[in-house]
Image (cartoon, helix red, strand yellow):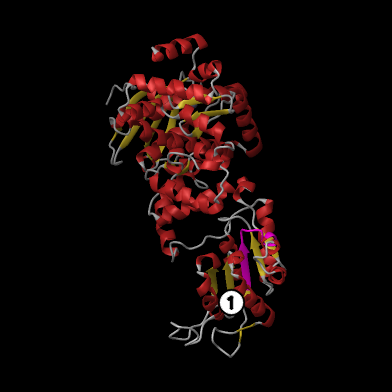
């Protein structure tokens, strides 16, 4: 491959979308920024001045590395099925599209197995050399640190091994252009000197060590559904957590309030784990899941012969939780007779099995939870007032997810790592656009819904790839979210769906062009509530043009 020609870059250009109304620029699903080179130049100058040249170089290299890695994702996305060299030059072509330099290929030799790699490129008008010279004048060492980071990050992610690029000449030293050479790190005699600029923290380390990390994690996870710790740092969440930790050292009955899916059982478990009872059982019962006629024997136990079918004596959940914690979920669903018994247990600290004369002392901390308004249930006569007061001694309200959107990134991170392990798969993370969508969603099903959505995303995302928006919300978005921020998001999404996908869908549907046009026109008119001028705007045409088409369809 001595003469390398770039393929037509329309596929890459089409990934770049401007959404000025929303204040977004997207490169595929990555959110981008249009920055002033002058401002970047200031930033570099400040960095060098405040942390010194070595640290500044390290920070900028790593920043470039991170952006190169993100662009490598797009190589797979756009040119996976093509010639390997065509796929590789997505990097240099994107680097040009992003305004960094004109990248002229000199030599490119590699095999897809990653055994060999050699590349040489020229950078014409590299922004970083210009910025450096602008701030400091000509220097005697190469300075395109961020751009070298980009080339190395892109190539390392593309090849799946650490490929180190180095400037063998730089325009900032008075040369006409910058020349970069890339080789596997171990082939550079001075690799040990260069490596620290890339390493530190997590970037190269993350790329190379993730596999082992996943292996290690898999071993530490005894039960694949093991409850992760409670995650959140928003004030409402921390307030609930604080109340729980204060209750832990006492034996007070706790009432957990909050919508379905907010993680009430997780809070109850955490309370149990933090308490002196942690080595005794934690027993959870969902009151709504048990039929009325079974609930009393489930909770309080039954003696042999207590009723037809009671062939053997059996301990109830209270007895099984002795010394520990009993979690009664959906306590509002308890039938009235069971409520009376529960109240007695709480008052006396003893239970009586069904059909038994004897009472048994029990030592159990009760954690009850409900997503209904118990006070309303009291007014309606379906919940005992005295039991309500007894349970409501220490209420803790767990906030719904929509009230703590700031916690979503940390939750997503923890969940992605969990599903990575669970499904034996390496996932690079979640795209900016997908994260944006998660933050806009109203989460009626709370953390549980987020878990389900992300698990699906983790399964659908490509190996080593990012979870993208299409992996999260398949087909229609959840219903009630549409009236929230999703109308705006829906539009954005529609604008960003690659046109070829729409075309492919239309072709696959077998619908005729004429029928499709008619549908499109009708839909636009409907959506504009019959206002033809507005419908024309939706379709990107003038009103007379729309009139003409409607007449044509009618005729
Ligand atoms: Zn340079």
Q: Look at the image and say whether residue 372 sits in the magenta stretch.
A: yes
Q: Residue at x 43, y 46 (%)?
A: 457
Horizontal side, residue 179 vs residue 55: left or right = left
Horizontal side, residue 92 vs residue 250: left or right = left
Horizontal side, residue 388 vs residue 408: left or right = right
Location of residue 530 in the rendering, given as x and y in whole percent from the top left corner: 53, 21
Q: Look at the image and say whether residue 266 sits in the magenta stretch.
A: no
Q: Is residue 275 visible?
A: no
> Is ligand 1 within 8 Å of the beta carbon of the residue shown at mark 1?
no
Image quarter where the C terminus lies is top left
Q: Range of the magenta residues?
A: 366-376
Location of residue 201 in the rendering, given as x and y in whole percent from the top left corner: 52, 47
Q: Nearer the viewer, residue 148 or 399?
A: 399
- Name above or below for residue 214 compared with residue 134: below
Disc 1: CA contacts within 10 A as few (<14), some (14-19) or many (>=20): many
Q: Nearer the viewer, residue 530 or 410?
A: 530
Residue matched to label 1? 324
Q: Nearer the viewer, residue 254 or 207?
A: 254
């Amino acid at each position: 491959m001595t003469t390398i020609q770039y393929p037509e870059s329309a596929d890459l250009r089409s990934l770049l979308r401007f959404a000025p109304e929303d204040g977004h620029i997207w490169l595929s699903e990555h959110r981008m920024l249009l920055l002033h080179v002058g401002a970047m130049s200031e930033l570099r100058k400040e960095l060098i001045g405040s942390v010194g040249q070595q640290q500044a170089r390290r920070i900028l290299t790593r920043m470039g590395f991170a952006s190169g890695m993100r662009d490598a994702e797009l190589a797979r996305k756009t040119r996976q099925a093509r010639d390997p060299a065509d796929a590789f030059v997505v990097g240099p072509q994107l680097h040009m599209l992003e305004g960094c330099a004109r990248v002229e290929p000199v030599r490119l030799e590699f095999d897809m197995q990653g055994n060999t790699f050699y590349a040489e490129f020229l950078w014409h008008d590299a922004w970083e050399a210009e910025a450096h010279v602008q701030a400091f004048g000509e220097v005697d060492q190469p300075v395109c640190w961020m751009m070298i980071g980009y080339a190395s990050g892109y190539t390392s992610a593309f090849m799946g091994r650490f490929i180190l690029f180095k400037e063998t000449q730089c325009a900032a030293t008075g040369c006409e252009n910058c020349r970069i050479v890339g080789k596997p790190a171990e082939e550079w005699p001075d690799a040990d000197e260069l490596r620290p600029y890339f390493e530190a923290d997590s970037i190269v380390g993350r790329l190379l060590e993730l596999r082992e990390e996943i292996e290690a994690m898999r071993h530490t996870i005894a039960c694949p559904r093991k409850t992760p710790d409670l995650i959140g740092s928003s004030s409402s969440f921390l307030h609930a957590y604080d109340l729980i930790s204060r209750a832990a050292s006492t034996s007070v009955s706790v009432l957990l309030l909050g919508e379905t899916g907010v993680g009430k059982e997780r809070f109850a478990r955490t309370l149990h784990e933090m308490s002196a009872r942690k080595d005794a059982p934690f027993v959870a019962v969902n009151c709504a899941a048990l039929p009325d006629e079974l609930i009393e024997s489930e909770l309080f136990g039954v003696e042999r012969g207590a009723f037809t079918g009671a062939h053997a004596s059996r301990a109830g959940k209270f007895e099984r939780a002795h010394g520990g914690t009993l979690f009664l979920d959906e306590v509002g669903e308890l039938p009235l007779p069971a409520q009376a018994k529960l109240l007695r247990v709480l008052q006396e600290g003893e239970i009586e099995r069904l059909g038994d004369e004897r009472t048994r002392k029990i030592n159990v901390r009760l954690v009850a939870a409900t997503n209904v308004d118990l006070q309303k249930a009291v007014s309606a006569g379906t919940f005992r007032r005295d039991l309500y007061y007894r349970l409501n001694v220490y209420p803790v309200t767990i906030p719904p997810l929509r009230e703590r959107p700031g916690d979503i990134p940390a939750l997503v991170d923890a969940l992605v790592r969990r599903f990575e392990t669970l499904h034996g798969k390496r996932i690079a993370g979640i795209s900016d656009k997908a994260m944006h969508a998660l933050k806009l969603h109203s989460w009626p099903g709370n953390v549980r819904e987020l878990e389900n959505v992300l698990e699906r995303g983790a399964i659908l995302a490509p190996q080593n790839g990012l979870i993208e928006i299409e992996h999260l919300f398949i087909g229609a978005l959840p219903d009630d979210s549409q009236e929230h921020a999703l109308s705006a998001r829906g539009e954005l999404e529609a604008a960003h769906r690659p046109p070829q996908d729409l075309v492919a869908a239309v072709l696959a549907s077998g619908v005729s062009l004429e029928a499709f046009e008619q549908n499109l026109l009708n839909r636009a008119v409907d959506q504009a509530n019959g206002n033809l001028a507005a419908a024309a705007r939706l379709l990107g045409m003038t009103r007379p043009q729309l009139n003409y088409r409607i007449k044509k369809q009618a005729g």
